[in-house]
Image (spheres, rainbow, N blue to C red):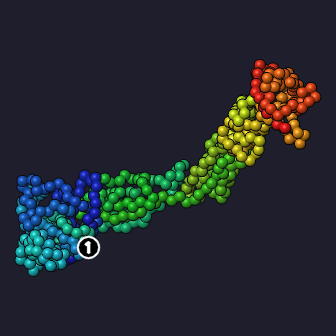
Amino acid sequence: MKLTFLILFFSILGSAQSPNDCEFSLLVCGGISIGLEPDGIGFDEFSIPENIAPSCYSFNENTIWLKIKFVSDGIFTFDIIPEESTADYDFAIYGPNVDCTSLGNAIRCSSTNPQSAGVSANTGLNLTETDTEEGPGEDGNGYLMFIDVLAGEEYYILLDRPHGSGGFIFEYSGTAALPSTPIANSVSDLVECDSDAVTDGFAEFNLDALIPAIVQGQNNLTVTFHKTLNNANIGILPLESPYTNISSPQTIFYRVENIAGCTDYNSLIIEVEIPFEATLPQDLLLCTDNIIPITLETDSGFSYYEWSTGEEGANLNMINVISPGPYFVIISDENGCKVKVSTIIEESSKATITDIIIVEFNGTKNNATIIIEGLGDYEFSLDNTYFYQDSNFFTGLLNGYHTIYVRDKKGCATVSKEFLILDYPKFFTPNQDGYHDTWEIIGISEFPFTKFYIFDRYGKLLKQINPNSGGWDGYYNGNPLPSSDYWFTINMKDGRTIRGHFTLKR
């Protein structure tokens, strides 16, 4: 009789129970397939006085414990076949009929290093060898003498991989019968629709409904489901049914166990299906200055629509709304799968310019601050509708008239307003060429009660200018004055007095 077991060594993290420990050793049964993925060592069984460490080597690298219970008399032989030819596997056998706290001495111990000995990496028990211990290093050929066993006897095998990497195949070739192994029959993968109101990729799976197909008439079996292969082999942390997936797709492992303690395992894939996609228009805007109903339209052709407004129906894939805020629709297809699609209708309005605070008669530091009110997010432009800025402050303004434009960033409307910056020119050239022929303050005519006076450098009053006169032409008593600097005083009705000087150039 030859039974093959594939055992892989990988990482086990955070498990309270591990076949690194004798207490949680794996029971080897007829036809079993072992898929455990352990690494490292667990509890030091040889710290217990009744347990004697293997005499041929220190087993302390990557260990696993197997337990074998025989149901008939016969011969006990096996082969350990490493997957990697450079790996080195050692073993020790304890028994018969010992337990993990009183193992006694090993009755077989093999720690031959195959590369040092120049032999195959395979090791085990066979019918030709006569020695019961070999190793370490180049001592031995990797095989020891078989064991005659009786029905009902139990043995422990301690396996260790001190060198190399990879798993191994465990082939049982003895004549003594092992307990029969249950079969974890394959089942179809499960696909569930994400049918709740939120499309999140999670769903509930009825794992218990799979049990009849897994056992297929086998009696007295226990079936459990697990998140990891390690948990399934050891039989820890079973999943509850219904089970909510943690990823999609996700592999679920299941374990069957009979009353003799023999197990088998298998796996299936569970997957959450989102069978369709749907859309709602985004970046919608409701301008409160001119409310026009907005149409919310989603994909047609589905079975049912449920809107957040309370409207619902089999063909209701569009509604009209006149209020800003969040909206959603839950769409169902013919299989009952649902998708929730959401949008937000933003509210905005055109701006109201409530004030323009200006600083004038200040040369290059003339500035204006635009004060507005409104629901929206606005941007500002001065004297053109091409270049906008977020700031409501403009500086370096020339004297004269300016137009400010305030635009709603979301597109509701643009408003504008004209304002005046008062300032005086720093020079004038009264040569009748049509440019700077008079010294005047643009817009001063809007302040009819303003009085301003022009003096020479000695303080002599040369001219009192009427705000509506068009400025000063550089003449005094009918005679042109020479190129020079001249001074002025402006008295405005609001109480301001502005003084300065300018240059007359001829």
In front: 411, or 501? 501
Q: Is residue 460 left or right of residue 168?
A: right
Nearer-the-camera pick, 505 or 169: 505
Residue extending farthest to the bottom is 128
Question: Farthest residue toward the right?
Answer: 478
**Residue 214: % across, % down:** 36, 64
Residue position marked by numbered label 1 in the rendering: 83
Q: Position of residue 447 (x, y in %)?
A: 84, 25
Residue 189 visible in this rendered orientation of the protein:
yes
Query: How many marks overall?
Result: 1
Q: Say whether residue 131 is left or right of residue 67.
A: left
User: At 68% from the left edge and 47% from the top edge, which residue is drawn?
Assistant: 284
**Closest to the observer, 64 or 166:** 166
Tell me the residue at 64%/41% (across/down).
Answer: 325
The x and y percentages for residue 169 are 24, 72
Q: Secondary structure at mark 1?
A: loop
Check disc 1 and give the amino acid type.
Answer: Glu
Residue sitting at x 86%, y 34%: 438
**Residue 352, position as x, y percentages in the image:** 74, 34
Q: Residues within 10 Å of mark 1 (few under 14, many from 20)?
A: some
57 displayed left or right of 378? left
Quadrant containing the N terminus in the rendered view:
bottom left
Q: Residue at x 22, y 59 (%)?
A: 40
